Image: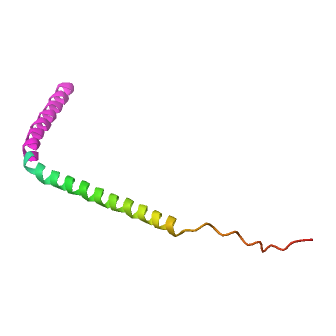
Amino acid sequence: MQRAKLCVEIGAIVLLILLNIRGVKESVTTILPVFMAFVVTHVVLLGVSIGATSETSARSRTRRSRTSTTPSQPSDSSPRSG
């Protein structure tokens, strides 16, 4: 008897889940454009910010390489024993 009750309860839960998923599918179609606009704008903003960061890094590397000269010889200030 307990086994049959458990099977009926599980079946009812699965049925409710399936009905709920059907309702979710219908409601998702109305929310989907807003969600897609959110995703697209974030992808664009992330792409632009990452691109700007990489350009800034490249410019600063180029600027450093242009302004850097050959390193000077280290001065030999250590005392000499003789």
What's the image's color scheme? rainbow
Q: Could you say which is closer to the camera, residue 70 or residue 5?
A: 70
Residue farthest right in this picture: 82
- How many numbered marks appear? 0
From the viewer's perspective, tell me whether residue 4 is left or right of residue 79.
left
Please tell me which residue is depicted at 20% across the width and 57% down the height of the picture.
41
Region of the chain picked out in magenta, as a range: 1-28
Q: Quadrant of the C terminus?
A: bottom right
**Residue 8 part of the magenta-drawn span:** yes
Residue 80: image location, x then y, percent: 86, 72
From the viewer's perspective, tell me whether residue 50 is left or right of residue 22.
right
**Residue 58 part of the magenta-drawn span:** no
From the viewer's perspective, tell me whether residue 15 is left or right of residue 48.
left
**Compared to 61, does 79 lie above or below?**
below
Residue 45: image location, x then y, percent: 26, 59
Q: Main secondary structure of the magenta part?
A: helix
**Compared to 8, does 66 lie above or below?**
below
**Compared to 43, does 59 lie above or below?**
below
The quadrant in which residue 56 appears is bottom left
Q: Could you say which is closer to the camera, residue 13 or residue 32?
A: 32
Residue 15: image location, x then y, percent: 11, 33
Q: Could you say which is closer to the camera, residue 56 or residue 42?
A: 56
Please tell me which residue is depicted at 12% across the width and 54% down the height of the picture.
34
From the viewer's perspective, tell me whether residue 81 is left or right of residue 29.
right
Please tell me which residue is depicted at 71% across the width and 70% down the height of the picture.
74
Please tell me which residue is depicted at 47% across the width and 63% down the height of the picture.
61
Q: Quadrant of the N terminus?
A: top left
